[in-house]
Amino acid sequence: MIKLFIQSLFLLLFATFANAQYNSDSTELNKTFKQVKWRSIGPFRGGRSNIAVGVASNPMVYYMGTTGGGLWKTEDMGLSWNNISDGFFKTATVGGIAVAESDPNVVYVGMGEHAVRGVMTHHGDGMYKSTDAGKTWKKIGLDATHHIARVVVDPKNPNIVFVAAQGSLFSTSNDRGIYKSTDGGLTWNKVLFIDDKTGCAELSMDMNNPTILYAAMWEHGRTPWKVTSGGPGSGLYKSTDGGTTWNKMQDGLPKEMGKMAITVSRANSEKVYALIESDFTKEAGGMYVSENAGKTWSHATSDHRIIGRAWYYIEVFADPIVENTLYVMNAPALKSTDGGKTWENISSTHGDYHNLWINPSNSNNMIIADDGGAAITFNGGKSWSSQDIYATAQFYRINVDNEFPYNIYGGQQDNSSVKIASRSFRGGINTTNWSGSAGGESAFLAFDPNNPRYVLGGSYQGTIEVFDSKSKGSTNIMAAPIQYLGKDAKDDKYRFNWNAPIIWSKHEPNTYYHGAQVLLRTTDMGKTWTEASPDLTRNDKAKQGKPGGPYTNEAVGAENYGTLSYVIESPNEKGVIYTGSDDGYVQLTKDGGKTWKNVTPAGLAECLINSIEVSPFDNATAYIATTRYKFDDHTPGLYKTTDYGKTWTKINTGIAGNAFTRVIREDTKVKDLLFAGTEFGVYMSQNGGKNWMPFQLNLPNTPITDLRIHQDNLIAST
């Protein structure tokens, strides 16, 4: 018997399964549950947006692309936003948007985030087009481009459109480069291709002469253990014939290049700005300026504020009216009024900025896109519209307590963790029903569910915050009190995953476990720690170097590898603990950590063990959800054991071939009733995983990051 309860960010869904008669056909299933609805409970706090644009002819209207939440539109200057892609788009992360200036009914959208994180949502599925200002959409190709950085439309002809494709993040790809259509997306031609490692990170059109274009080509890629930004394929290019031919610009530019951005001034077509990642030891990176349309360049500044964490940022935008004014998007948003020589902070919105659209006829009117969503200004950035009115946040993990009403806990990407009530007795759930909790954005949250006063929440590199929800005070604890930022992972005493697991022990009083490459145990709230295992990962030292290069290291530890990614204690047996690693090992102890056995499925390829579930009905039965999207393999990877991991069976039948899996759970009252969370939604099995069927109902097409079953509710984070 389960009531479904989903959390869109936190979505809740109510249904009763105990006496239902199931049919294996998904159509019949949806008829059975036609009265069942997933219920979004928020929190209504924005999440990451890589792109937001306005409509030049109508300052009331704007579009926002989110990572995992689709495309949104406001027609009242940001007072309210509505999703306009649900039911049309097949993937949920937007990388580029362009509204045709000559016909604002024509809108192009490119999928796949261009600020390419190694965690959370993955690739897009090409291009979509609307000819009725977003009411309806049509798919128009470029499916294999994966990550689209920019879409540019000729200001006089809405059928001429260019697409900057970064390509597949986790492998080489021949679908990188610049594409052009002259028939509104019916057909496409690749007009610039460097090699299978190099994509287009930025494309700028001279709006005074749209046959002139500037492009920033970027050699880049990721493995699970490193982000590579830069190489011989990187370069700046110019076309003067509408993209037919391209010439590499070099005079005055650095020889070594990483990620770059480029923009041509609408106020003066001779002035072009380029923001360049390069060898920082030689002070070669920074802002470059051309006064002659790219023939020669001069170095304006190496200010590190404008080039920090280059793979994630590096965005520059020229004021369309004042030629010496320009903006850079980085951790802060920065403005220069002297052609890029000096900079000042200009925005007080969320932070971690990725895009800026400036109204070509009024440069005080802008919309900014950052890790908190999008915000609009009409006074040059002195004040902005709210980002706390749409539920587009990305969540990692769910935990729940036993209070009434019970609360749901989770870490929000690039924000605090949250604690949110599962229901409200005074109308709908609102800001009075949720608050911040322990830890940072990537937190696992652990506590005694019967007495959740003290919450342990994780953060980067093994930092844990202990939060007293009664006094509202907190303190930080660490197994090894040092932050290994920017070091080789092999030199760390403990290697921690970005989303490092922390669990409370049901069977051992006052005990918590924390996953590094070993399992750590504390019985005194983190004052002291003991190692409860040896290294439980593959421990491949060749994959434990610096997490970024060749010019910019990735200091925050998002690319640490050879770490534990999941830990679970058996709900029924004391001393039985499973661990999963981000490099594909499953380990088991039956004696509380005295001895361990590697129970990895035979032949399992190197992968991320993202979740483990121990059956509430049979102590020997467990399930794992694996994923290999960081190896550019998007197939589902669910496995089941009925003998404590001695043997495993694949249980993926019925799940779409590209719907890689993050989580699997079994109902607490109906044996063999399983739920799985994938990149493209929820699936259900009634026979222990032998067959699966979609269980979307009214749930938008969005990645599912975690599932929990609690008090006859199914809870999902997205």
Image: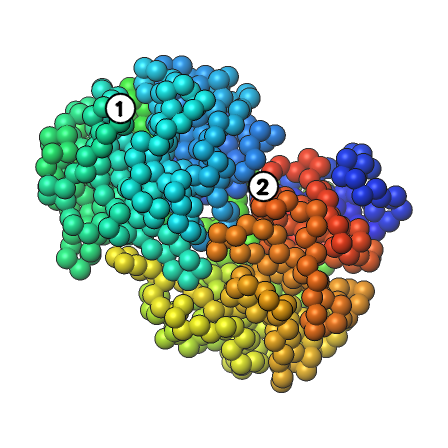
Q: Residues within 10 Å of mark 2 (few under 14, many from 20)?
A: many
Q: Is residue 100 above or below residue 717?
A: above
Residue at the disc numbered 2:
702
**What residue is shown at x 64% (from left), y 73% (from top)?**
599
At label 2, which amino acid type do we have?
Answer: Thr
At label 1, which amino acid type do we have?
Answer: Gly
Q: Is residue 446 above or below residue 149?
A: below
On the image, the x and y values in percent for residue 585 come to 57, 69
Q: Nearer the viewer, mark 2 or mark 1?
A: 1
On the image, the x and y values in percent for residue 718 come to 59, 46
- Residue 468 picture quarter: bottom right
Residue at the disc numbered 1:
242
Decide which of tag 2 and tag 1 comes sooner along the chain. Answer: 1
Give whichever of 400, 54 is nearer the camera: 54
Asked if the residue under mark 1 is in contact with the one under mark 2, i.e. CB atoms within 8 Å, the reply is no
On the image, the x and y values in percent for residue 605 come to 55, 63
Res 181 visible: yes
**What residue is shown at x 22% (from left), y 20% (from top)?**
209
Does residue 100 appear to the left or right of 701 in the view shown?
left
Give whichever of 289, 588 is nearer the camera: 588
Does residue 120 appear to the left or right of 152 in the view shown?
right
Q: SS at mark 2?
A: loop
The residues tagged by marks 2 and 1 sit, at their Cα atoms, a distance apart of 37 Å
